[in-house]
Image (cartoon, rainbow, N blue to C red):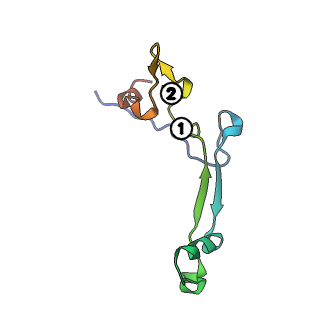
Amino acid sequence: MPRKLIDISVPLRNDVTADPPDNHPTIQYIDHQQGLPRMLQFFDGLTAQDLPDGQGWAVEQVSLSTHNGTHLDAPWHFHPTMNRGERSWTIDEVPLEWCFQPG
């Protein structure tokens, strides 16, 4: 029987709703001019005049929790043990087929 997959992902943004509310991601956007000094540190002798329009790299610095965005909480998130004392599974141990079931 064919399955219908529904994308419930949410992009990471500074204003994305978070749970708890003070646990939202923070993204610092660094434009080409702000990134120039960092880029010049990577290459000995490189100057802004060597680059097209004197522009460096644009990058984003992201700070987030594994509880941000669309995610699945592993048993480990809730407690270090499960099943009467067995070590709880981390997210890489959760069977993938659990994620493809009727909603």
Asked if residue 101 is positioned above or below residue 24 in the image, the reply reads above
Mark 2: which amino acid?
Trp
**Mark seen at residue 97:** none
Residue positioned 56% across, 70% down in the render:
57
Residue positioned 52% across, 77% down in the render:
43
Q: Quadrant of the N terminus?
A: top left
Asked if residue 55 is positioned above or below residue 87 in the image, the reply reads below
Q: Position of residue 17 (x, y in %)?
A: 65, 39
The quarter of the picture where residue 78 lies is: top right
Q: Is residue 48 visible?
A: yes
In the picture as drawn, the residue positioned furthest to the right comes out as 22
Q: Quadrant of the C terminus?
A: top left
Report helix, strand or loop for mark 2. helix
**Residue identified by numbered label 2:** 76
The 10 Å Cα crowd at callout 1, few under 14, some 14 to 19, many 20 or more, is few
**Residue identified by numbered label 1:** 70
Q: Position of residue 29 (x, y in %)?
A: 64, 60
Q: Position of residue 49 (x, y in %)?
A: 58, 86
Residue positioned 59% across, 77% down in the render:
55
Q: Is residue 56 visible?
A: no
In the picture as drawn, the residue positioned furthest to the top comes out as 84
Mark 1: which amino acid?
Thr
